[in-house]
């Protein structure tokens, strides 16, 4: 029995959520006219059923408008006491008061729910934009790491510690691209569509970071350093896979020219990174894994 009651309440809550303010107002208006017609019918049957200032209500158009006024004041519910129902009419008046309270409660509930939805949507938009900004900030810091690697490894020998640092940076980039993919590709329907400006800025940050990464890899190649470990190449493969999904997501979508240019650059950088990863596979097989 409690489960059945919970299901009914859940259905009622869903019905209220789907109901618009226009439908609520239309239903209330129909109720007012319906009860006005019921009251006027009682007057036609018995002119003593309802009294207006202690006098019978007229059986005319004026009497119907008096009943419409009485129905409106009853459903509000706020009666002035100038119209008094008698006999069975009181039961219908009580029923209209109850219906009026229910409709008023639904209206207030809908109003509060709408206000909450607006607040939640605003908070979500702030949170969404904050996530995009955090990804861009993290990419900025990662570019600094890659730049320092490129400068440092000119004069230092590539060792196990450097290999570990390089792998950590690749892992960070892979994680940031995963977060970007989750936000940009809208893997869930409740996620908002990223606006064109933020999308362009995000791809611009990704492009600049990839340029720094490619510079590091090319530096290692130029010094004939065997940097290809299983851990690093697997991470690079994951990065390339995420870049492919990010760029293909907007392949058939209508976006502005600036964003298309940034995505085209991302594709070119992805292809360069893929070529660097797959170069000298025979060397990779003979490389000692520097990361335990």
Image (cartoon, grey):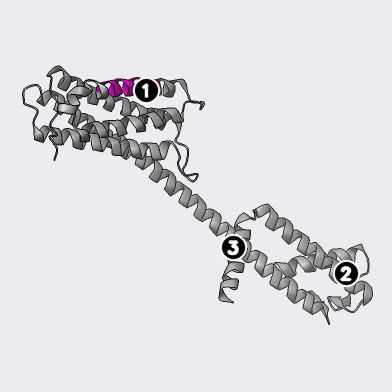
Query: Which region of the structure is painted magenta?
Result: 264-276
Q: Which residue is mark 3?
A: 13
Asked whether the viewer can see residue 78, the reply is no
Seen as rendered, the residue at the extreme bottom is 87
Specify the quadrant of the image occupied by residue 74. Answer: bottom right
Element marked by disc 3 = helix
The N terminus sits in image quarter: bottom right
Q: Choose the circle earlier in sequence order: 1 or 2.
A: 2
As measured in the structure, the alpha-carbon distance from the residue carrying label 3 to the one carrying label 1 is 48 Å
Q: Which residue is mark 1?
A: 267
Q: Which residue is mark 2?
A: 40
Prevailing secondary structure class for the magenta stretch in the rendered image: helix
Specify the quadrant of the image occupied by residue 273. Answer: top left
Does residue 109 appear left or right of residue 123 in this picture? right
- The location of residue 195, given as percent across then percent down, is 45, 33
Q: Choose the circle earlier in sequence order: 3 or 1.
A: 3
Q: Choose the circle earlier in sequence order: 2 or 3.
A: 3
As measured in the structure, the alpha-carbon distance from the residue carrying label 1 to the one carrying label 2 is 76 Å
Q: Residue 273 magenta-drawn?
A: yes
């Amino acid at each position: 029995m409690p489960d059945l009651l919970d299901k009914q309440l859940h259905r009622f809550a869903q019905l209220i959520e789907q109901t618009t303010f226009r439908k609520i107002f239309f239903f209330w208006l129909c109720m007012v006219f319906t009860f006005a017609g019921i009251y006027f019918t009682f007057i036609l049957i018995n002119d003593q059923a309802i009294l207006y200032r202690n006098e019978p209500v007229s059986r005319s158009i004026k009497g119907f408008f008096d009943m419409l006024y009485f129905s409106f004041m009853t459903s509000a519910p706020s009666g002035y006491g100038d119209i008094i129902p008698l006999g069975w009419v009181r039961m219908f008046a009580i029923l209209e008061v109850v219906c009026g309270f229910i409709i008023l409660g639904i209206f207030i509930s809908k109003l509060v729910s709408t206000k909450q939805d607006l607040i939640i949507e605003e908070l979500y938009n702030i949170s969404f934009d904050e996530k995009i900004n955090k990804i861009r900030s993290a990419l900025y810091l990662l570019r600094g790491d890659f730049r320092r690697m490129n400068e440092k490894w000119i004069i230092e020998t590539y060792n196990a510690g450097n290999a570990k640092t390089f792998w950590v940076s690749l892992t960070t980039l892979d994680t940031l691209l995963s977060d970007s993919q989750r936000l940009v590709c809208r893997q869930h329907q409740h996620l908002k569509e990223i606006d064109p400006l933020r999308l362009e800025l995000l791809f611009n940050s990704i492009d600049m970071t990839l340029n720094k990464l490619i510079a590091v890899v090319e530096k290692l190649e130029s010094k004939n350093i065997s940097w290809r470990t299983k851990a690093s190449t697997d991470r690079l493969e994951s990065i390339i896979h995420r870049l492919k999904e990010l760029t293909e997501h907007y392949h058939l979508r209508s976006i502005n020219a600036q964003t298309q240019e940034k995505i085209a650059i991302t594709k070119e950088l992805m292809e360069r990174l893929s070529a660097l990863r797959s170069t000298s596979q025979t060397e990779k097989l003979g490389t000692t894994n520097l990361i335990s």
